Amino acid sequence: MELLKTLVDKGLRRELPTREEALAVLSTTDADLLDVVAAAGRVRREWFGRRVKLNYLVNLKSGLCPEDCSYCSQRLGSKAGVLKYTWLKPEEAAAAAQAGVAGGAKRVCLVASGRGPTDRDVARVSDTIAAIKGEDADVEVCACLGLLSDGQAERLREAGADAYNHNLNTSEATYGDICTTHDFSDRVATVQQAQSAGLSACSGLIAGMGERDEDLVDVVFALRELDPDSVPVNFLIPFEGTPLAKEWSLTPQRCLRILAMVRFVCPDVEVRLAGGREVHLRSMQPLALHLVNSIFLGDYLTSEGQAGKADLDMIADAGFLVEGAGTTTLPEHRTEDLVAVRRRGAGTELPPNA
């Protein structure tokens, strides 16, 4: 397909595809799927070799959120049967984080439900970051606490946070359909606050909420414009007790096309396969490793992932290497470029073969 050759050539040059080209990836047929995966996989390997970065999520505070995001099991009025608890103590969170680090995770993601943190919450999270870094000074810590107020991103950075996650989730045009308690611009502003404070920005999307192809392309282009260092791609898990409980529209093939489109639009950015991969990709998860270069190890916020051992076996069986475990290789001529991309906004030094 001429389209795929064009997209590969652009990806190797870090050139953005056109909106029409991105839409065309989503409209390819199942018969073309392996060609699409192979083309996007070539771009992935050019910038990240065969490495897979592992991330581990620690849910610091669960449930009882005042926001009404339709996709979320912790939303206001949710009847989903999820755990509800207040803040974990720093030592409890650090112990949980160490389980992920022991499994090979390079980044720990600290997540708390709610519209956004109070200053007291930021102090709590700062203590937790100190406890985690006290166990392993090299582990990356990413905070995900909701909408930030003035000065909070700076305080998190001073406390040792390396990154901040706040997803755009869907296109600006359809954001009001999934949430009414805040808007798209609030999310953009929080990502920009994190970047201004010197935190590495992590921002992504949720697919499978009834959106059109145009919405998926729009949100990925909006993300590219924000220039985050990592882009998590979530696939909706339709929790009973939420407004999107019956939204079962994704197939494994559709998920792979979405991931390929994201890779073409974000060729040199860490693309992370996140929530819902086990549910929607199922036996085709190994193919996704040719498109993404980062996954979560273990469980998510309010849903279980597959066993960590199964993840590690899948990575090895597919011929990939866990980043930081043993000898990892990256095309030598791309090492300097990749380090610059990964360091962007983070303010931290990376080892020569990071």
Image: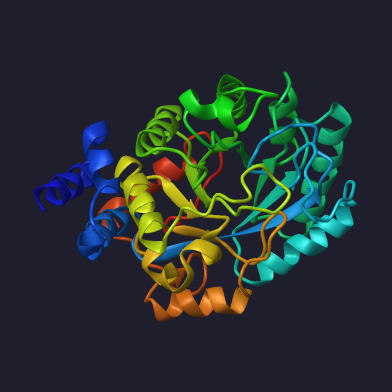
Task: State the image coordinates of residue 39 (x, y, percent, origin top left).
Answer: 22, 57
Q: Position of residue 346 (x, y in %)?
A: 55, 38
19 up-or-down from 25: above or below: above
Left or right relative to 300: residue 118 = right
**Above or below — where is 193 with respect to 46?**
above
Q: Is 304 placed left or right of 13 in the picture?
A: right
Quadrant position of residue 222: top left
> Residue sitting at 50 percent across and 80 percent down?
313
Can residue 18 be seen by looking at this rendering?
no
Picture residue at 73% right of the left edge, 34% below the top = 156
Q: How is the image coloured?
A: rainbow
* Of the pair 7 and 33, the residue shown nearer to us: 33
Q: Residue at x 36, y 68 (%)?
A: 287
- Residue 108 location, x and y as percent? 66, 54
Q: Nearer the viewer, residue 120 or 27?
A: 27
Could you tell me which residue is drawn at 43 percent across and 55 percent down? 352
Specify the farthest residue to the front. 246
Tell me if residue 19 comes above or below residue 340 in the rendering.
above
Is residue 199 shown above or below 285? above
Can residue 131 be seen?
A: yes
Q: Count the marks.
A: 0
Left/right of residue 67 with respect to residue 37 in the rendered view: right
Relative horizontal placement of residue 299, taking residue 85 as reference (left or right): left
Q: Position of residue 296 (x, y in %)?
A: 58, 60
